[in-house]
Image: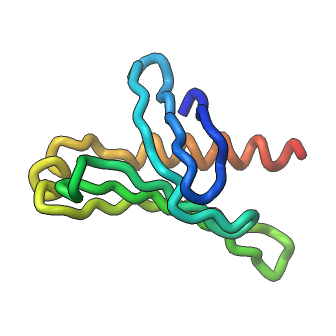
Amino acid sequence: MERIDGRIAPGEKLTIHLRPAQARAFPVTVSAFEPATRMVWTGGLPIGLFTGTRVFKLTPRPNGAVAFDMREEYAGPLAPLIGKSIPDLQPAFDAFAADLKRRAERI
């Protein structure tokens, strides 16, 4: 992700801008937000034909560290068809997690 436009709060709309190499932006809604714990973004096609849900979760560990988990799920009647056209997101997820870790460790 290059940047996010909008306010992170339940029910708010965000526009996610991907890195210039991908040159895309897509709208999502913040469907859940629990500061320092969990955030959920939802986007997709009208009337539930396709819905993508991305969940970000932070879990404290006994040693003072924090585990970060991010997953994306697809639903709706067009999910099998559209899901096949979505590229492997694992490299992007790994890069996002590494960037987040670097930033968190600077604070």
Q: Residue at x 24, y 47 (%)?
A: 45
- Could you say where residue 15 lies in the image, as x and y percent from the top left? 50, 35
The answer to which image quadrant residue 88 occupies is top left
Q: Is residue 18 left or right of residue 51?
A: right
Protein image colouring: rainbow
Q: Is residue 28 left or right of residue 107?
A: left
Give the number of callouts.
Answer: 0
Q: Nearer the viewer, residue 107 or 53?
A: 53
Q: Residue at x 37, y 50 (%)?
A: 43
Q: Nearer the viewer, residue 83 or 95?
A: 83
Does the rendering let one see residue 67?
no
The residue furthest right is 107
Q: Residue at x 24, y 63 (%)?
A: 75
- Could you say where residue 40 lies in the image, as x and y percent from the top left? 52, 61
Decide: is 77 above or below 62. above
The residue furthest bottom is 62
Does the rendering let one see residue 12?
yes
Q: Residue at x 30, y 48 (%)?
A: 44
The answer to which image quadrant residue 10 occupies is bottom right
- Could you say where residue 62 lies in the image, as x and y percent from the top left? 81, 82
Q: Quadrant of the N terminus?
A: top right
The answer to which image quadrant residue 25 occupies is top left
- Could you say where residue 74 lies in the image, as x and y percent from the top left? 28, 60
Q: Nearer the viewer, residue 4 or 69?
A: 4
Q: Is residue 61 left or right of residue 8?
A: right
